[in-house]
Amino acid sequence: MSDGKDLCYLTIREAQEHLKGRQVSSVDLTRALLERVHEVEDRVKAYVTVTEARALEQARRADERLKAGENGPLLGIPVAIKDNMCTRGVRTTCSSRMLENFVPPYNATVVERLSEAGAVMVGKTNMDEFAMGSSTENSAFFTTHNPWDLARVPGGSSGGSAAVVAAGEAIFSLGSDTGGSIRQPAGFCNVVGLKPTYGRVSRFGLVAFASSLDQIGPMCRDVTDCALVMNVISGRDHRDSTSLVDPVPDYTRALRPDLRGLKLGVPKEFFVEGMEAGVKEAMETAIRQLESLGANIDREVSLRYAPYGLAVYYILAPSEAMANLARYDGVKYGYSADAPTMWEALEKTRQLGFGAEVKRRIMLGTYALSAGYYDAYYLKAQKVRTLIREELKQAFERYDALITPTSPSAPFKIGEKAADPLQMYLSDVCTIPVNIAGVPGLTVPAGFVGGLPVGMQIIGKPLAEETLLRVGFAYEQATRWRHQRPAL
Ligand code: GLN
């Protein structure tokens, strides 16, 4: 059997084979990962909480189920969960002072489903506070470092979830994506990340940021793993009324090594001004590769409303956030400041409990929704949202999927954009239109620029996850980017 570090870099499918063949037990695998966590965590800082004892207990139970002949795809597989998904008995902080000591009395539906499937939770991952950000620098606790270059950000807001997969600190993870928070960090860390169709995965127990945009999805080492996780977490949940009733296919059946018969469009608006030259080159190479796999590529697609996605997002997301975050009043749960009167206590709680970016979003949202400005900002943004959605819908009458870069740049340096919120917001220009339209988006590793990972995004129509996985799978079979490991 291979050494401990090799175990840590197994895919779900490979780990499953090892478990089934009894070469390794879930306890062995979990121990190897926990050792890896101890070895690298002082440099990567991706976990807010490591649930060591609980993980070993879950692993022991998984081993019993395996011994009894059970054989689920995630049985005994170690996973990391972004710290905005509720875990019964394990604190769920959203990387905020506000929830620093919040221990939920219930599990998010995704956590429940993973646990029933026998997955082993290693810990809860660091993020930008309340998922607002693109670098994890907005975490109230610490910044996560990109395993590919510790001086750089892992992306965000699910930066911890991307970093643990890249650093061999979990076999896979869950992230959440409101404007790019799964795809951008996955792209920055050479990881596969899927933001499913809005409603495909239950949001019950996900701490709400912008409820019309939020979606949970898998972050994995390859496309097959993403399909396996989707099989477990997708589907109707009566506790989330926006979850879709459509039957869940077996996503692994879509995986085929060629792209014959598929028509792919490359929308030119996503190759934005100021995009890094290396990213553009990597994309051109990737697109030629897709062509050689049999896809019919149209490079002249135009989506004229997509560039307004960013502006629409920074009205709608803060508006929804300011309403969602009104619940943190120091009374019901979370941080509570002491003060002589109720109003003073409320004020002080929010003053000390929230970080600067969260306060900025609350103010932006409050402004956009205020009586005199509602029509000019919120209402207008909703109208443009419809235009973006309609335009994409029309594009999908002609194309099976659209191909874009995941981000306009490779991972940036820690501190480089932290002082300039507008620069930070621009990291999500390519991913935001996907949330605005509620459609699925997949990112797969697509090369390196100066040793730093670049991601390619594949966008499809609602519930076209299978098409995206097929494109991603064929591409990854033809390339070797996913086999690279950071020199940690
Ligand atoms: N970076 C974007 C923001 O700051 C998107 C975050 C997300 O998807 N959660 O809002």
Image (cartoon, helix red, strand yellow):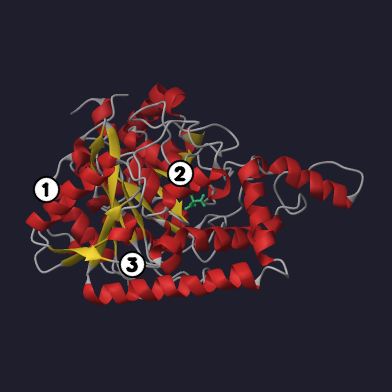
Would you say the beta carbon of the disc 2 residue lies within 8 angstroms of ligand 1? yes
Q: Quadrant of residue 394?
A: bottom left
How crowded is the residue under tag 3: few (<14 C-alpha within 10 Å), some, or many (20+)? some
Upstream in sequence: badge 3 or badge 1: 3
Front-most of residues 194 and 450: 450
Upstream in sequence: badge 1 or badge 2: 2
Kind of residue sitting beneath label 3: Leu
Question: Do callouts 3 and 1 mark residues in contact (Cβ within 8 Å)?
Answer: no
Q: Secondary structure at mark 1?
A: helix
Kindly give the residue lying farthest to the right in the view shown.
340
Q: Residue at x 37, y 37 (%)?
A: 411
Residue 214 coordinates in the image, percent (x, y): 49, 60
Kind of residue sitting beneath label 2: Gly
Report whether 318 appears left or right of 260: right
Q: Quadrant of the N terminus?
A: top left
Q: Which mark is residue 303?
A: 3
Q: Which mark is residue 478?
A: 1
Q: Secondary structure at mark 2?
A: loop
Answer whether residue 121 is visible to the viewer in this image. no
Residue 63 coordinates in the image, percent (x, y): 32, 42
- What is the C-alpha distance between the residues marked 2 and 3? 26 Å
Q: Which mark is residue 156?
A: 2
With respect to residue 89, does 200 lie above or below?
A: below
